[in-house]
Amino acid sequence: MKLILAAAACAALAFSASAVDAKGCLKGAAVGGVAGHVMGHHALAGAAVGCAVGHHQATKKARAAQATAAQSAPTPKR
C-alpha cells in the first residue's frame, strides 16, 4: 500500500512540475557527487550541494552577461 501511494505521489509531482531552468545544476551535481564520494562517501549530499552551487554560479554568470550587454547596447537617438 505504501509503495502504491509513493508511486502515485511521485507521478503527481512529475506531471505537475513546470519546466525548471537547471542551468549549472548537472555540472555542479557531477562535481559535487564525485567530491562528496571521495571526501567520505557522501555522494548524494555532495551532488545536492553541487547542484545548488552550480545553479548559483550559472545565474551569476547570466546576470553579468546581461549587464555587460545592457552597457554595450547603443542608446536610441531621437
Image: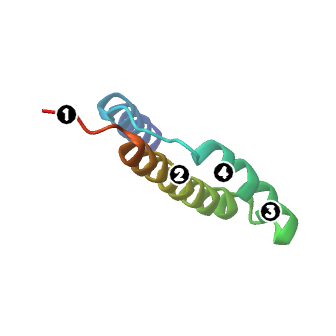
The residue labelled by disc 2 is: 61
Mark 3 and mark 1: span between their CA atoms? Answer: 53 Å
Residue type highlighted by circle 1: Lys
The residue labelled by disc 4 is: 29
In the foreground, 55 or 42: 55
Q: Mark 1: give few (<14), some (14-19) or many (20+) Cα within 10 Å.
A: few
Quadrant location of the N terminus in the rendered image: top left
Q: Are marks 3 and 4 in contact (CB under 8 Å)?
A: no
The residue labelled by disc 3 is: 35
Q: Residue at x 58, y 61 (%)?
A: 53
Residue type highlighted by circle 2: Lys
Q: Mark 3: give few (<14), some (14-19) or many (20+) Cα within 10 Å.
A: some
Q: Which badge, 1 or 2, comes first in the chain's sequence?
A: 2
The residue labelled by disc 1 is: 77
* Rendering coords of residue 34 (x, y %): 81, 56
Mark 4 and mark 2: span between their CA atoms? Answer: 18 Å
